[in-house]
């Protein structure tokens, strides 16, 4: 275990990078403004297993968290696992999943996911979110317009009269209520794989995290955290 602690808590404290923009994983704030939710509680469980103190390191957006890998700013990062990020981050299998899909405005002729990627269609997305990275890899014909935040994406979608808004289903359920007649398309174009990562090169630490995540899913810990925080739209990921 000492080699794991040396890699994951070299300062004596486990520093956990937390993506503050994911309202399913960070669902509230504590008395001092500290993040509370499934993601911070997973970090607390890891620190408890290692027997070290925990420091939560918040990031406003996931791209900023990913960019900080290897800088010494965090030791583990709780973030969506995407191939682009995996070039520098050693990820566990997912501990939880969130469906990503599309919303269309009132009167839209688009009825299915397959109809979205066509010439002349404009998709509004949040830059560098896990689902946006999927769009970057997979959209071939439609035009993707990116904004700096989830709120800005909805505002841009409305202001521009865009064809499609990409997002996490739980957030789109909120947005569709603010646009009478809008629709969320059935199905998903991907599921964001919420995982835990550490810098590549931390072999012992990465192996520990992979084992911890599988145990957390099998033991019911992840399910208990989702229920404790009353999160709707987050599900336990399958065994890795």
Image (cartoon, rainbow, N blue to C red):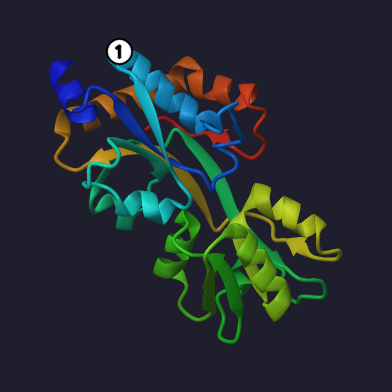
Task: Answer left or right for 69 relative to 114.
Answer: left
Towards the viewer: 77 or 143: 77
- The image quarter containing residue 5 is top left
Compare residues 117 and 181 and report the one nearer the observer.
181
Q: Position of residue 75 (x, y in %)?
A: 27, 35
**Image check: 98 left or right of 128?**
right
Counting from the top left corner in percent of width and height, residue 111 is at 72, 69
Task: Tell me if residue 55 comes above or below residue 25 in the rendering.
Answer: above
Question: Of helix, strand and loop, which one carries label 1?
Answer: loop
Which residue is pictured at 26% across the width and 46% down the height?
Answer: 89
**Residue at 21% across / 46% down in the picture?**
70
For the point 26% across and 47% down, which residue is it?
69
Between 178 and 100, the residue placed more toward the observer is 178
Q: Nearer the viewer, residue 212 or 113?
A: 212
Residue linked to disc 1: 51
Image position, residue 26 (x, y; %): 55, 37
Left or right of 131? Residue 154 is right
Against 89, residue 223 (above or below) is above
Query: What is the count of numbered marks?
Result: 1
- List the single residue furthest toward the right: 180
- Seen as rendered, the residue at the extreme bottom is 120
Residue pictured at 69% horizontal, 61% vertical: 185
Residue 73 point in image, percent of width and height: 28, 42
């Amino acid at each position: 275990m000492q080699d794991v602690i040396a890699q994951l808590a070299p300062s004596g404290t486990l520093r956990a990078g937390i993506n503050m923009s994911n309202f399913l994983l960070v669902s509230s704030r504590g008395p001092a403004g500290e993040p509370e939710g499934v993601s911070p509680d997973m970090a607390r469980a890891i620190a408890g297993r290692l027997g070290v103190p925990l420091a939560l390191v918040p990031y406003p957006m996931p791209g900023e968290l990913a960019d900080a890998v290897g800088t010494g700013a965090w030791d583990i990062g709780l973030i969506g696992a995407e191939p682009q990020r995996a070039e520098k981050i050693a990820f566990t299998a997912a501990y939880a999943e969130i469906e990503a899909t599309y919303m269309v405005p009132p009167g839209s002729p688009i009825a299915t996911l397959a109809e979205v990627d066509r010439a002349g269609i404009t998709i509004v997305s949040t830059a560098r979110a896990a689902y946006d990275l999927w769009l970057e890899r997979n959209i071939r014909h439609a035009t993707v317009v990116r904004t700096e935040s989830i709120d800005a994406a909805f505002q841009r979608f409305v202001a521009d009269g865009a064809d499609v808004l990409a997002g996490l289903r739980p957030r789109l359920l909120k947005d569709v209520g603010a646009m009478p007649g809008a629709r969320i398309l059935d199905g998903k174009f991907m599921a964001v794989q919420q995982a835990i990562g550490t810098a590549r090169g931390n072999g012992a630490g990465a192996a520990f995290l992979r084992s911890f995540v599988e145990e957390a899913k099998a033991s019911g810990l992840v399910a208990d955290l989702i229920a404790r925080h009353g999160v709707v739209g987050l599900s336990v990921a399958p065994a890795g």
